Image (tube, rainbow, N blue to C red):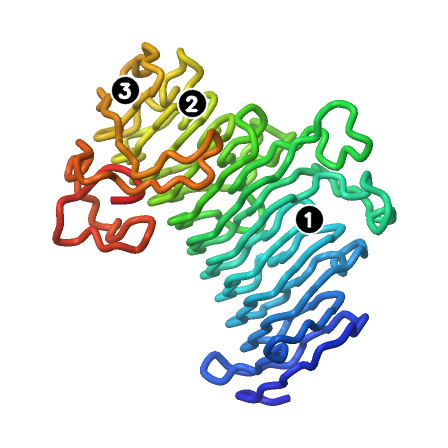
Amino acid sequence: MNAGQTAIVAAGNYGERVRITRSGTQASPITLQVASGAVAHLLGFDITGNGWIVSGFDISTQTNGTDGFGIYVTGTASYVTLQTNYIHELCHEGIFMDPGVTHISVLNNRFWRAEMAGVQADGMYDLIQGNEVWDTQQYAANAGGIYAGCTIAGGADADAFRYFGQHNIFRSNYAHDIYHDMPGDPHPTNPNPHTDCFQTWGSSAMTVSDILIERNTCRWPGTNQFQLANINASTPGNIGVNEGWVTNVTYQNNLFSNMGQGINIEGGVGTVNVYNNTFVHIAQEGLVCNGARTSADQIHNNIFYDVGDGGDSYTSGCQNSTVGNNVFYMPGGASVGAYPNISPYLSINPMFVNYGDSTSAGADFHLQPSSGLKGAGVTIPTVTDDFYGTSRVGSAYSVGAAQ
């Protein structure tokens, strides 16, 4: 196939792994598209070529090594779009990108029972948008059956997304229902995961910088085990050893609910911005700084609703950050105070349109017209819309992810 050509793939169980080495162009990509209404099963893709669109495949494999990724993007691959694929039941990650790749778009895929993470995005100028990740497994081999031959990766975990590299965007993704096995479970695939919706740490391959995480939903099945995000300058298990610079990470217009802890910023990390997010039903703090912070951090216009177990503040350890216009509201009326030296917060019932159930399932986090948070935020020029894509420009600027 040559640049600009399209192959329509018929339904079938092809039982093979496709290795893409030739290239199209950014303007004229080569397209592999499953026929409308058809199901085409593959063992996955290895992509080193440029200018490709891979769309609509059903991918599952229980192989180890790089053949165990649903889709492996490596070498200097660029301008590759991976869209509307169903990637499931793997020994390793759903989509894995190496540091040398650029301009990879991962759009509207579904990832069920990947191991370690649904997507690991490295390289530069990647866009990960509109994807769904659920039921990631820490030790897939423990399930037996089709997973019996899976090897256990070092540092096994069960995350939704892992990010490295530079200038990468995570937008409008939905991560949910990654479980922690209870005692006595006969197939403990997730005995002790440190589950994160988004995780990174210092990389010796390249600086981690200019990362935008916006308009995502992250909802876990219980508040006692999981957290939203861990940002570290060292590899997990090697805490205190700075292995690469992590800086300029921005969380804005996200909905985070039903988890043990929110964003956890470890030592040695540069600027982190937290704008217009809504945190709901968080057992401990919504924002934790485990290391010296500076006024370069900007923490504004966030809603922390039902955050802390009747005594925790919405944040801890972030006293040197620039903090303002945040709302901390406990619906049960618990008496809670700001962490020492943190700017005063607003204690106002946000009056969401629908609070949903105890996990926030079914919730609508728009603010009711009479909410005191309408127009109560500080204007942030870089946050031009809200969670639903509604423009914030030219109107009263509200607190939280959804106006």
* Vertical order, 123 against 366 (above or below): below
Mark 1 and mark 2: span between their CA atoms?
A: 29 Å
- What residue is disc 3 on? 342
Q: Which of marks 3 and 1 is nearer the N terminus?
A: 1
Q: Helix, strand or loop at disc 1?
A: loop
Is residue 255 something one can see in this rendering?
yes
Mark 3 and mark 1: span between their CA atoms?
A: 40 Å
Q: Which of marks 3 and 2 is in front?
A: 2
Quadrant of the frame with the N terminus: bottom right
- What residue is disc 1 on? 113
Between 54 and 282, the one lying in front of the other is: 282
Q: Contact (CB < 8 A) between labels 1 and 2? A: no
Q: Which mark is residue 329?
A: none
Q: Helix, strand or loop at disc 3?
A: loop
How crowded pointer 3 is (Cα within 10 Å; few <14, some 14-19, many 20+) is rated as: some
* Vertical order, 394 against 46 (above or below): above
Left or right, 218 with respect to 49, comes to left
- What residue is disc 2 on? 285
Left or right, 157 with respect to 199, comes to right
